[in-house]
Amino acid sequence: MVTMKVEYINAFIGAAQNVFSSMLNTEVTLGRVTVNTSHVTAHDISGIIGLSGDAVGCVVVSFPMDTALAAYKAFAGEEIDPMDPNFLDAIGELTNMIAGNAKAEIVGMSISIGLPTVIMGKQHCVNAPQNVPFICIPCHCKLGNFSIEVAFRSETGNN
Amino acid sequence: MVTMKVEYINAFIGAAQNVFSSMLNTEVTLGRVTVNTSHVTAHDISGIIGLSGDAVGCVVVSFPMDTALAAYKAFAGEEIDPMDPNFLDAIGELTNMIAGNAKAEIVGMSISIGLPTVIMGKQHCVNAPQNVPFICIPCHCKLGNFSIEVAFRSETGNN
């Protein structure tokens, strides 16, 4: 049974839409939200950021390589080699902005966000602990598809 | 320039040795510690846990598949299929124990640890932000090789 309140999910969706609109000048539309209680197969490159405090969990923003490279170009104004550390840093920074923006939207809870880690690897899987389901949000924008996965467990009993 | 104090590194090394000794009944010996300022190529399966509070960063415990399966067998007393969610959970729990044990050893700092995330994917890369280098500790035990990578930045100015 999944008890994550819809307003928490909406905070992450709104955050992604805000960040993509303001930083990448593109509107994000959504596919059907699903809940995955096992691992999720992510795309080629994923930014992961941990949440702690009144809620523990993580946010994963995962991109096919083509979308990630197009997002970098929209972000920085120039193309980049996928092996350039600045590329991975930019994906981490996008993830950080989405998590930070969502954190600001979730009122009444004190949430700390960690440093973003970026994973690169063809069709890697990401797994949260079994008792913390991933909410998976497929996203589309003119740069391509990507997805946001949020594993989020309230520690205050108020979930 | 890397300013991570050696006692912090030692806390993570000691934690891995304690957890492997007590939970998996095997002694861990160390290879040469290196510092990686770009991404690290991890093995097949990695547990990642975020640190926040007086220090921000993450701990990555990364295993070749053979070592991870042997560690599961030593941990649970039986073999497992790599696609079983209990396998990924066990790797996450080992990572959680190492991070928790290290946190207890780092005196004078208040550190929160997040939930472990487990990544599976052949030769995936893990990247911390460019200004936070990874300390990479190659480890060996009778179950096989594995590695611990720690990205750690003190937020108190006392690093």
Image (cartoon, coloured by chain):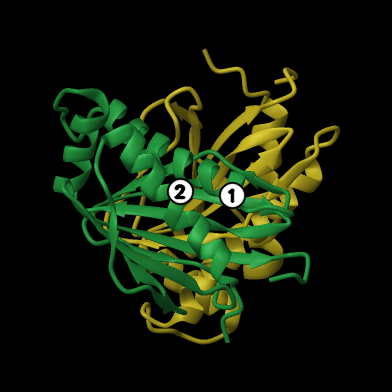
Chain colours: A yellow, B green
Closer-to-camera residue (A11/A49): A49
Quadrant of the rendering where the C terminus of chain B is positioned: bottom right
Residue at 46 percent of width and 29 percent of height:
A34
Residue carrying label 2: B15
Closer-to-camera residue (A95/B13): B13
Residue carrying label 1: B105
Contact, CB < 8 Å: mark 2 with mark 1? Answer: yes
Residue at mark 2: chain:
B
Q: Amino acid at mark 2?
A: Ala
Residue A35 in the image: above or below residue B94: above
Q: Position of residue B113 (x, y in %)?
A: 60, 44
Mark 2: give few (<14), some (14-19) or many (20+) Cα within 10 Å: many
Q: Amino acid at mark 1?
A: Glu
Asked whether the viewer can see residue A145, the reply is no
Residue at mark 1: chain:
B
Relative to A74, B147 lies left or right: left
Relative to A53, B70 lies left or right: left
Q: Position of residue B119 (x, y in %)?
A: 35, 48
Quadrant of the rendering where the N terminus of chain B is positioned: bottom right
Tell me the SS state at disc 2. helix
Residue B88 location, quadrant: top left
Residue A65 location, quadrant: bottom left
Give the mark, 2 or 1, whose residue is nearer the N terminus.
2
How far apart marks 2 and 1 lie (CA) works out to 8 Å
Q: Which residue ends up furthest to the right in the rendered image? A: A108
Asked whether the viewer can see residue A118, the reply is yes
